[in-house]
């Protein structure tokens, strides 16, 4: 029998290496501490105080109010709770519609541009990505013209025989409008009488307003190109052998994409969905430039509500509390999608097709 190789000797840890590591990372740690950790810590303190923006938030004139700012938002029963509930309702519909649609569109564009038979792929990549590098303020101003009462969108709809709405002045919910077309204008009693964060459940199910729908279209238009590049990079790193094996086994184009290509894109899908969730829950500049929360607060978002509470109403504690509740929401949904998109063992059916360990193998 061949001699057993001796185990590799452990590399000795030298204190000099530790000191060198800390010296190299010290500048960045100082910068992060001064411009990230300290401001976040101060904002957290402000969320527990009644600071009005005048003087230092740590002065003796500022009182510690505990969880009062948070209670006003989620259980206060007043205008603060209703506005916060309205902003969450608006933003939730924005997230639910933008994130999946922009992900699907980005995958479609990536697969389309990645095809070798397509001529001028560089041009199409640039064209699809260009809206992403354009100023969001400029895009919003353009959108105000396009979706105005006499804008180009309504002109096109008019040619098709459709009477377009005055997009940014219409507070009605899209879902309620669709139900109204079938004669349903009032919800069941348990939806109209049950409130959540100051709003009846019937209002939560109203869907995005017509005005918010224009912002949803804009978000999909401006972000799909960025995520397309991520999917293109992932597609170019995939092995062609698995694709060829699927084709040899008789898989058509859709089966090859759904059962072979898409599972290999799972890490990229997770990245895109995570970035999408974070970005859509933080939407602010489009609202600030376009509608300032109107009409009827149907485009109000938590980020914009935090801004108006702090900088306009001088209720800095409430504004900071909204920001931290929004942070908790983003963390929750990020962990949730990590759970949903986690790697799972192959079922027995997929194992017979592709090989690999089956679910529960080895038990």
Image: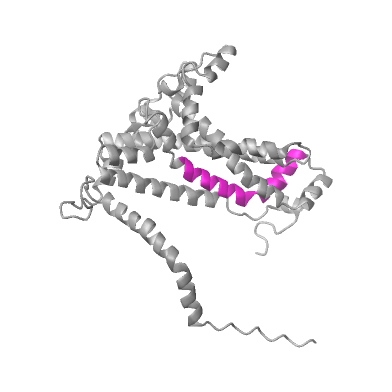
- Residue extent of the magenta highlight: 253-280
Residue at 26% over, 46% down: 317
Q: Is residue 221 above or below residue 188?
A: below
Is 98 part of what is drawn in magenta?
Answer: no
Q: Is residue 266 magenta?
A: yes
Q: Is residue 246 visible?
A: yes
State whether residue 182 appears in this view.
Answer: no
How many marks can you see?
0
Q: Is residue 71 left or right of residue 205?
A: left
Where 300 falls versus 114 (above or below)?
above
As drawn, is 72 to the left or to the right of 238? left
Residue 253 percent coordinates (x, y): 76, 39
Given residues 27 and 242, the one toward you in this image is 27
Residue at the outermost right position? 248
Q: Nearer the viewer, residue 56 or 354?
A: 56
Residue at 53 percent across and 52 percent down: it is 338
Point out the image quarter for the C terminus.
bottom right
Q: Image quarter for residue 102?
A: top right
What colour scheme was applied to this rendering of the protein?
one colour
Q: Is 265 on the left-hand or right-hand side of 182?
A: right
Q: Quadrant of the N terminus?
A: bottom right
In the image, residue 32 sits, relative to residue 127, either above or below, namely below
Q: Quadrant of residue 111?
A: top right
Residue at 49% in and 81% down: 16
């Amino acid at each position: 029998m061949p001699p057993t190789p001796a185990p590799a000797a452990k590399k000795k840890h030298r204190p000099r290496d530790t000191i060198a590591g800390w010296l190299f990372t010290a500048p960045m740690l100082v910068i992060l501490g001064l411009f990230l950790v300290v401001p976040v810590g101060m904002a957290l303190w402000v969320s527990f105080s009644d600071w009005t923006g005048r003087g230092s938030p740590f002065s003796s004139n500022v009182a510690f109010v505990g969880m009062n700012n948070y209670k006003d938002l989620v259980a206060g029963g007043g205008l603060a709770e209703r506005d916060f509930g309205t902003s969450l309702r608006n933003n939730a519909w924005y997230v639910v519609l933008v994130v999946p649609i922009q992900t699907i569109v980005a995958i479609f564009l990536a697969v389309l541009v990645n095809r070798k038979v397509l001529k001028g792929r560089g041009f199409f990549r640039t064209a699809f990505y260009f809206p992403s590098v354009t100023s969001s303020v400029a895009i919003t101003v353009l959108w105000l013209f396009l979706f105005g009462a006499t804008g180009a969108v309504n002109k096109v709809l008019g040619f098709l025989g459709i009477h377009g709405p005055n997009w940014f002045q219409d507070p009605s919910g899209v879902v309620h409008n669709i139900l109204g077309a079938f004669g349903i204008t009032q919800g069941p009693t348990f939806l109209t009488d049950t409130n959540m964060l100051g709003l009846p459940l019937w209002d939560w199910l109203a869907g995005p307003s017509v005005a918010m729908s224009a912002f949803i279209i804009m978000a999909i238009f401006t972000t799909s190109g960025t995520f397309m590049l991520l999917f293109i990079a992932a597609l170019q790193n995939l092995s062609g052998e698995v694709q060829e094996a699927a084709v040899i086994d008789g898989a058509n184009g859709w089966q090859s994409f759904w059962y072979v290509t898409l599972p290999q894109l799972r890490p990229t899908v997770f990245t895109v969905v995570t970035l999408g969730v974070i970005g859509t829950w933080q939407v602010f500049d489009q609202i600030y430039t376009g509608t300032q929360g109107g009409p009827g607060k149907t485009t109000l978002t938590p980020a914009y509500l935090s801004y108006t509470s702090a900088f306009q109403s001088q209720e800095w504690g409430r504004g900071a509390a909204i920001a931290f509740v929004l942070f908790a929401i983003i963390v929750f949904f990020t962990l949730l999608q990590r759970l949903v998109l986690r790697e799972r063992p192959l079922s027995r059916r997929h194992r017979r097709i592709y090989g690999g360990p089956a679910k529960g193998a080895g038990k």
